[in-house]
Image: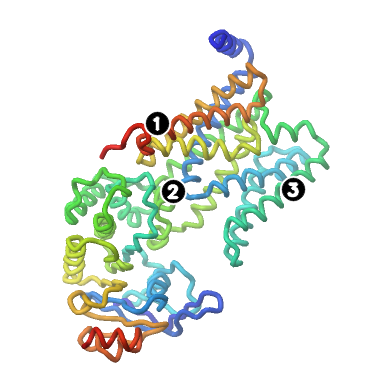
Amino acid sequence: MLRVEDLTVSYGSNMIFKDLAVDFRPGKITGIIGPNGAGKSTLIKSILGMIKKNAGSATLDGQELSKNLTKVAYVEQRKDIDLAFPINVFEVVLSGSYSRLGLFKDAGKKEKAEALEALAQVNLSEFKNRQIGNLSGGQLQRVFVARAIVQQAEVVILDEPFVGIDMKSEKQIMDILKSWRDSGKIIIVVHHDLNKVNDYFDDLLIMNHGVVAMGPVAETYNQTNIQKAFSADLSAVLFA
Amino acid sequence: MFLNSIQEFFSALGHYGFLQSALVTAVMVGIMSGIIGSFIILRGMSLMGDAISHSVLPGVAVAYILGINIVFGASLFGILAAGLIGVVATKSKLKSDTAIGVVFSAFYALGFILISMAESSTNLHHILFGNILAVSDSDLITTAIVLAIVIAFVVFFYKELLITSFDNNYAKSYGLNTNLIHYGLMLVLTLVTVSALQTVGIILVVAMLVTPAATAFLWTNRLHKMLVLAAIFGVISSIVGLYFSYTFNWASGPAIVITAAAMFLVSFIFSPKQGFVFKEKY
């Protein structure tokens, strides 16, 4: 169980959310939805300790998460990546082993074999020597999922993984998320496309500067909650 | 006539110890600045490189006044500047290029004042523009030590340098101390600056960091190859620049930098990555 308690984050005087508390369950895919600026990315970045929190904690099975970050794999938004960097697909995937290796130890045969295996899982074996700028959006996203595979983490957090990618890649990634879920991992997906909520997620966190609703999709994904987080118009269209 | 002067350069190399020291120093500086410069440009820190190289000036002055090795004075002020830039950028809403501008110009100005107090105006000219033909034995040894440190740093921290340069957010997400890598790189950068100061002078150190690395970037898609190529381009510019400096009595800094820039120009036109003349295949 990934438990977030009393989490408060602000940028300067701008409060993003206050005393936020949610539990992410193992063996479930949890979607996080909410309007732009609702604090979705801020929530996961503060869970990971990448931005400073004013108060609160994130614990994994009772242990402080920021001290157990090797148990978490993070797939960030693709727009944050330097596509011109001199690195190829294989090296990116191999970097998934860095957290385990620690300082002064290079990736060896075992890690390289794992990277190749992960590339095969996302059907990108033939692209392993390609510079990452020469891939489609969907292929690049699969590269980062392959890196997360190599990380062998208990918790996988993905920020907007399906933005601007093809259907085939989206389905492949979703299949991998489901297999992770079935092996008992905690999967968290920041998401924007409200149409697929029912198909993709087991649990749903609806945010708007705090928790609007959290729980199984069947109980949370309804007109009232969407209206609270987004707008009456949107909820009327979705639940017409 | 060119052949003659090249012959003359090489025969002078055989005769004069000062020219040999100059060549060896220039080659070492070419290697280290190419390697560290590659990380600087990939991290989008060219301006930071320029700032650090200027910020060591007060350290150089203090070292002269106290009669200690300039490496110590320069490192202290280089790291101090990097730290202050970090503080101003994170503790205010100013953009980091503004923080860099404020801090490094202040350090540079302080350096001028301290140097004038030290009353060594001839040295000032050498510090600003480089005077590779006056490299002493102890300078040579210092440069060799710095080169060893640079290579050790990059070998031991290669994967951390790679991942923080490529994807700093990801490195943070698995708990890597990215600040430590940043300030480690800044420390090594100040050491490189002190060495490069002898060959090209403070004003043009940034060119040695940026230009060979940028040239290398145009020819490869792999980081380790880029590091090797940048070092090679750095060495070639150093040797050719030294030849021009000796033969035509140009200041060594501008001679080396112009050579590096000429290689960049050729690469810019002909590299497959640019695709003006040859297209990249994959």
Q: Residue furthest bottom?
A: A224
Secondary structure at badge 1 equals helix
Closer to the chain start, of discs 2 and 1, is 2
Side (left or right) of B128 relative to A218 = right
Toward which corner of the image does residue B127 lie, by quadrant?
A: top right
Type of the residue with mark 1? Phe
Q: Chain of mark 3?
A: B
Figure quadrant of the C terminus of chain A = bottom left
Q: Residue at x 20, y 51 (%)?
A: A124
**Residue B109: numbered disc:** 3
Residue A88, placed above or below residue A204: above
Residue A235, placed above or below residue A199: below
Secondary structure at badge 2 equals helix
The CA distance from mark 2 to mark 1 is 29 Å
Mark 3: few/some/many CA within 10 Å (<14, 14-19, 20+): some
Callout 2 and callout 1 share a chain: yes
Type of the residue with mark 3? Ala
**Residue B161: numbered disc:** 2
Secondary structure at badge 3 equals helix
